[in-house]
Structure formats: C-alpha cells, structure tokens
Amino acid sequence: MRNAIVEPVRFPFDAVLSSLTVCANLKPSLIIHGGAWNIPDEAVDDCRAGIRRALEAGWKVLSGAGTAMDAIEAAVVILEDDPTFDAGIGSHLNRDGRVQLDAIVMDGATLKAGAVAAVERVRNPIRLARSILEKSEHMMLVAAGAEKFAEENGVPLCAPEELVNERERMAWRRCLEDSHAAEHHVGHEHGTVGAVAIDRHGNLAAGTSTGGTCCKFPGRVGDSPLIGCGCYADAEAGGVSCTGHGEGIMKIVMAKMAIDLLHDQRVLVPHREKGGPLSLAQAVADACIRKLAHRAHTTGGLILLDRDGLPAAAFNTPRMAYGYVQPDASFRIAP
C-alpha cells in the first residue's frame, strides 16, 4: 500500500463562506467529485470536462426549483456515463473480467438511504439506489436481488458487456499477464463519483457511485454503498460523499465521522491556532482526512456541504477531481 500524505489538500472556501453568510435566504448548493487518485496530466482535461458537465446537469435541476435528490441523480448519471471515471461505463473489471457496480443515495430529512451493490446489468446504479430508497422497505439490495428489483420497478437493465470499457479490458489483460498493478489503470487506484446538494427548500441529499477497485475479488463491496462510510446525509448537520481506499474509509466510518464533527465546534481550535480556515465545514473535512491517514494508513478524499450549503473538500492523494457552484452561480473546478 502506498504511503499516505498526512496533510490534506483543499480549496480556499473562506470566500464562499463570506458570500453565503450575508444571504438572508438559503440558496441552492451543489458539490460533486469524480474520485481522489493519481490523476495523470493527460487525463486532467477530461476530468475537468466531466465535472463541468455534471455540475451543469445538477445545477440546471436546482436553479429550476428541482429537488436535491433530482440534482444529485442528474449529476451522478453524467459521471456514470463518462468513461473517464470509475463508475458505470469506465469502471474497473474485477478478477473475473466483469464490472460490478455499487451506489447509494441518502435523504437528509428522513435519514433513509437506498443502496445497491455488486450489480452487473444496471448502467446507472445511482438510479436503482434511488428507486430502492423510494419504493422498498429495505435500504440495501445486492447482486441478482438488486437486479430483480430493478426489473420490477422500471429501472432499465443492460447486457453486462455494455459496461466494459476497452481501456479497462486492456488493463485487466495486462494485470493477468504481469500481475496486478495500479499503473495499468491510468492512475485509477481508488476511484468513485459522488454529489451533495441542497435545494431552495432546504432539502439535503447525497449520493455516491463506484465501479470499485481494479481486479477486485468478485463480490467485493467497498465503502461507497455503505451508509456512514461512503456517504451520509443529515439535514441537521450536512451531507458527505467519500472516495478513496474503501477498506480504509470503512475502518473509520468516514462519512458519519464528518457529520458528527459538524456538530462539534472544537474541531476549529487547531485551525484557529495555526491561522487556518475559520469554516467549520473545511476544518471537518481536513480532520477526517488526517484521521484516514493516521488510523487507516491510507489515502482518499471527501466532499461535503454543511446544513447552510457551505462546501468543503479535502484529500491526501496527488489530485482529486471535484467542483462546486459558487454563490454567483459560476463553477469552481479542480484539478
């Protein structure tokens, strides 16, 4: 396992904080990510373009008085359909050369989630996750059972081969010939996509979707579809979507950790002592990534919105693909 970079990397969100605090009414807010990983220089433009398209799709919903849940679905579907990212088409192949997808959505008002894992015939698992949230008494369905639910509830199925990207098929073959190695996968060591949104009515929702790790054991499920690990939303605090090494994120239950810390002003103390950011949201994001490095000894990232719509992001990988909508409705995109 690679050595973790201890200090998290982040954008300067303080300007966003000052803009938001002068607003009398809550404005819609949206932040998305396309994974924290070693994004090579030649992939940066594709990542930025994908993030922009996803922001446009989500923001079109929110600016048109749509719901937060509609917005995160719209944004994540764009990323699932973009082979640049490790979700939907473009996902890593497992050890058997098949794509198995995981996803989750969560409603901050009710604390109900809908999650799906290890599906092979669903092009957009985020849509299936939402269907489970809205139509099922359960919160997670997996594999053949999840696909049966999709078939019975109007979520289209596809042939498994439709999810296989030729780039990833070639990478899988190289792994078979020369043992598994991350460099065969264009830097996608740990990739995931996600979104968090608040609509003009104050409704908050979060979602995460992934193809998992390259050459994973069939049936492996990481953090992404697990409530509190890869995603969490609570209208009383905020919403989070995580990305990175799934087993490490599960160890510290990182999404729920972030939500809990949003209730604790003490998180700000070390930042104020160092003259750091005064945003509680950013202090929380930083603290979670430090904990991931210190206790799980691995890498990853997260995005979040606090309950007032203030965005924050942090990561300890070389780069993370993400973006958010600024108070003037312009987009801020990284890397």
Image (cartoon, grey):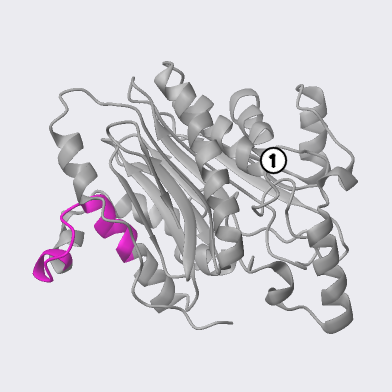
- Say above or below: 242 vs 201: below
Instruction: Please state the horizontal and vertical placement of residue 275, each as a whole percent of the image.
Output: 11, 66
Hey, which quadrant is residue 97 in on the image? bottom right
Stretch of the chain drawn in magenta: 271-287
**Camera-side residue of 250 and 97:** 97
Q: Where 119 falls versus 55 (above or below)?
A: below
> Which residue type does callout 1 highlight?
Asp
Quarter location, residue 16: top left
On the rendered structure, is 141 left or right of 204?
A: right
In percent of width and height, residue 7 lies at 33, 74
Choose between 167 and 147: the one closer to the eye.
167
Examine the rendered structure and indicate whether residue 311 appears above or below residue 255: above
Question: Residue beneath label 1, please?
Answer: 81
Instruction: Let me know if residue 274 is in the magenta part.
Output: yes
At 69% across and 40% down in the image, what residue appears?
A: 81
Residue 308 seen anywhere in this rendered image of the structure: yes
**Residue depicted at 45% across the width and 45% down the height:** 232
Choose top left, top right, bottom left or bottom right for residue 38. bottom right
Please state if 242 lies on the left or on the right of 220 as rendered.
left
